[in-house]
Amino acid sequence: MNRNPVYLALDLPRLDAAEALARKVSGHIGGIKLGLEFFCAHGHHGVHELHKVGLPIFLDLKLHDIPNTVAGAMQAIHVLQPSIVTIHAAGGRAMMEDAKAAAGENCKVVAVTVLTSLDGDDLAAIGVSADPHDQALRLAELAHAAGLDGIVCSGHEVGAVHKQWKDGYFVVPGLRPGSGKASGDQKRTVTPREARDAGASVLVIGRPISRAEDPLAAARAIEATL
Ligand SMILES: O=c1ccn([C@@H]2O[C@H](COP(=O)(O)O)[C@@H](O)[C@H]2O)c(=O)[nH]1
């Protein structure tokens, strides 16, 4: 049976609450995603604690700096044994190549293309004339050429990227389980099922579970749609 593709984004300020939530839904998710909020607050200690839940750990650190600095950061997190780490494709090809070379053996390195919180107007405001779809495809091509395992993109682009990069590993956040669900700061959303059908390898889901009245029921309901 295929592993559950859902990684729960634990964007919570308290370590005990994050661990309790992960344990509660652990039977209905495939992994745990720890991002900037968690890592800045709890660092290596927090990651070691969450490993105790017994699920793969995805470190969504979105590294973006000069190649030497990013390679050093990758080496510094080997000890945490992450299954996936994110870097930014906009850091350029040399940065991506050096990050991949510095990653541990069992760690997938994936590049963020266009954040799911951005739309075409946001890209124009930072001087990018391409729309999110074309920009995501362009950065996916660069990440592929740099030897990365895959990319992060929205569910709107994953189908097109999958056609060009058949064996890529595709992480899709910005997921909202049904129409009428609050999208918050996310601008390019699809349902978990739509993302899966379009070729997503990993479905990143945070608030639809963590802020649900009943997180266990929410995780179960999402699992049932997949
Ligand atoms: O383009 C991106 C890249 C990463 N994320 C991260 O995914 C989760 C989404 O959380 P929700 O609560 O389900 O919106 C969050 O940790 C982001 O940092 C993303 O949303 N978009």
Image (cartoon, helix red, strand yellow):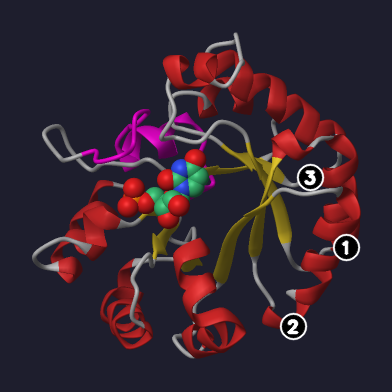
Which mark, by number, is residue 79?
A: 2
**If you read the primary sequence from the N terminus, does the residue marked by circle 3 or circle 2 appear first?**
2
Mark 2, ligand 1, within 8 Å: the answer is no
Residue at 53% of width from left, 85% of height from top?
51
Label 1: few (<14), some (14–19) or many (≥20) C-alpha neighbours in 10 Å: some
Q: Nearer the viewer, residue 211 or 190?
A: 211
Labels 2 and 1: the sequence-earlier one: 2
Q: Residue furthest top?
A: 129
Residue position marked by numbered label 1 in the rendering: 102
Asked if residue 213 lies left or right of residue 143, the reply is left
- The picture places residue 7, in percent across and down from the top left corner, at 44, 60
Can residue 167 be seen by looking at this rendering? no
Disc 3/disc 2 C-alpha distance (Å): 20 Å
* Comparing labels 3 and 1, the label whose residue is closer to the camera: 1
Cβ atoms at labels 2 and 1 below 8 Å apart: no
**Which residue is nearer to you in this view: 97 or 52?**
97
Q: Secondary structure at mark 2?
A: helix
Which residue type does callout 3 highlight?
Leu
Q: Crowding near pointer 3: few (<14 within 10 Å), some, many (20+)? A: many
> Between residues 123 and 225, which one lies in front from this camera angle?
123
Q: Is residue 98 above or below residue 162?
A: below
Residue 208 seen in the current view:
yes
Q: Secondary structure at mark 1?
A: helix
Kindly report the distance in space between the C-alpha atoms of the residues bearing marks 2 and 1: 13 Å
Q: Is residue 44 magenta?
A: no
| Relative to 94, 226 lies left or right | left
Separation (CA) of disc 3 from disc 1:
12 Å
- Disc nearer the start of the sequence (3/1): 1
Q: In the rendered image, which residue does mark 3 sit on?
A: 148
Residue 1 point in image, percent of width and height: 47, 61
